[in-house]
Image: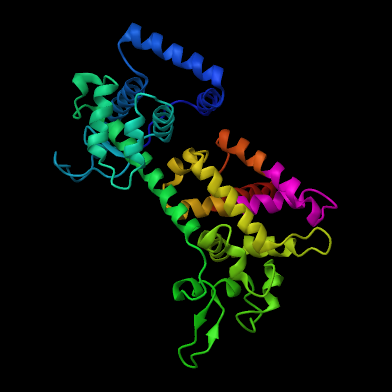
């Protein structure tokens, strides 16, 4: 059960505030006035509003005869991630709430230690929650039993997960492709158990299913946008993540990937498919590290697969952006990619970015409506 929090326009304004030094200073002054006049803090107000809304919704569902969850959580049991129990009903913590708390902690001087703890691989979530409850003057002297505290705890769990994801992605970037590493080679190669002959199948077959790869080092790799005979050398910039992203895209969205590959091999407006994919990996990682991707992650999940979904969205929409311009050549790639990145950053601010799967569903529904009309 989702509960509604601030609308998208409010969140857009909040984003603008945090991007401007003088707006941020003004916002902090307003928060100071509110703290002095109401004896509350921004975090306590945010969680208090969420708790109040959850109670009202649970009461409405109770009056409507909705069935409560069939199980009861013991006081010492672990709640589900992102879930708060309210009057026996499961309430999904609002994405907007998690995002606002994340922004607040990110720019809080008072919570620098707590933010570092959230970034830690060994984060003790209960301890961080207790510290914030006390510092930010939550009700009942910072008691962890209040509904406001439960919303804070659940939100902090999502935020900590996002930091863990950054660490996981950075680890893949820092893992350089090693041709002597069998696990790495399997991304490009599979072994025929009957003949013991190597088939460079993983990436190649996903992208070029109807053409056989002759050997490990071959100019055929240039057909899918690598620079030379050995594709491993092109992954140096973004490590194994560049290969992970390309392989996920080609396997998960084969129709889209094939369409992009065809566009990239245009006789005039061509661009290198694989190398461009690695550029897109670099941009995707940049948005993750700078926390521009936070709302998307809180909306769809703080997992590596969700990051890959964002990558797929980027490559699909980049190709649409590229093909929407006429008479482009490879010499235009740098400038057009710069323009594309600006467009995506604006879309992230406006909450317009979705997974590629969701985009395809929307396009299919639109196509059906047009056909019926």
Q: Residue furthest top?
A: 37
Residue occupying image coordinates x 55% and y 36%: 351
Compared with 60, 307 (above or below) is below
Magenta segment, which residues? 313-340
x, y percent for residue 329:
82, 55
Residue 323 is inside the magenta segment: yes
Left-right relation of 359 to 131: right
Q: How is the image coloured?
A: rainbow
Q: Is residue 71 left or right of residue 206?
A: left
Residue 199: % across, % down: 55, 83
Q: Which residue is rendered at x = 18% and y = 45% of the image?
A: 71
The quarter of the displayed image where residue 226 is located: bottom right
Q: In the image, is residue 351 above or below residue 314?
A: above
**Looking at the picture, how far across and down is residue 208, in whole percent?**
64, 73
Q: Is residue 224 visible?
A: yes
- The residue sitting at 62% across, 83% down in the picture is 215
Comparing 146 with 330, the one in front is 330
Residue 242 drawn in magenta: no
Seen in the picture, residue 143 relative to 303 is either above or below; the reply is above
Most extreme residue toward the bottom, as rendered? 195
Q: Look at the magenta stretch and give its main secondary structure.
A: helix
Residue placed most toward the observer, 31 or 58: 31
Identify the image quadrant of the C terminus: top right
């Amino acid at each position: 059960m989702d509960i509604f929090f601030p609308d998208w326009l409010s969140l857009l304004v909040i984003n603008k505030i945090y991007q401007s030094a003088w707006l941020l200073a003004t916002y902090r002054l307003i928060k100071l006035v509110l703290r002095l006049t109401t004896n509350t803090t921004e975090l306590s107000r945010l969680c208090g509003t969420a708790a109040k809304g959850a109670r009202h919704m649970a009461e409405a569902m109770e009056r409507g005869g909705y069935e409560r969850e069939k199980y009861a959580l013991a006081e010492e049991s672990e709640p589900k991630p992102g879930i708060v129990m309210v009057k026996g009903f499961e309430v999904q913590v609002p994405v907007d709430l998690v995002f606002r708390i994340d922004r607040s902690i990110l720019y809080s001087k008072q919570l620098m230690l707590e933010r570092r703890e959230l970034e830690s691989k060994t984060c003790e979530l209960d301890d961080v929650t207790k510290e914030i409850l006390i510092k930010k003057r939550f009700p009942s002297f910072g008691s962890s039993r209040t509904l406001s505290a439960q919303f804070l705890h659940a939100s902090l769990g999502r935020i900590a997960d996002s930091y863990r994801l950054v660490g996981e992605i950075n680890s893949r970037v820092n893992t350089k492709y090693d041709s002597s590493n069998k696990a790495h080679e399997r991304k490009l190669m599979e072994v025929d158990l009957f003949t013991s002959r190597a088939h460079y199948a993983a990436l190649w077959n996903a992208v070029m299913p109807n053409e056989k790869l002759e050997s490990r080092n071959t100019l055929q790799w240039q057909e899918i946008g690598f620079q030379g005979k050995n594709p491993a050398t092109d992954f140096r910039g973004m490590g194994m993540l560049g290969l992970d992203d390309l392989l996920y895209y080609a396997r998960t969205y084969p129709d889209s990937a094939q369409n992009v590959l065809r566009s990239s091999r245009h006789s005039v407006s061509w661009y290198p498919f694989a190398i461009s994919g690695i550029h897109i990996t670099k941009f995707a990682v940049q948005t993750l590290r700078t926390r521009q991707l936070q709302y998307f992650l809180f909306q769809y999940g703080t997992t590596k697969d969700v990051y890959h979904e964002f990558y797929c969205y980027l490559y699909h929409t980049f190709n649409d952006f590229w093909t929407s311009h006429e008479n482009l050549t490879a010499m235009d790639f740098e400038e057009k990619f710069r323009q594309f990145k600006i467009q995506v950053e604006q879309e992230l601010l406006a909450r317009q970015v979705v997974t590629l799967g969701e985009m395809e569903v929307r396009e299919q529904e639109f196509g059906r409506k047009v056909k019926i009309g």
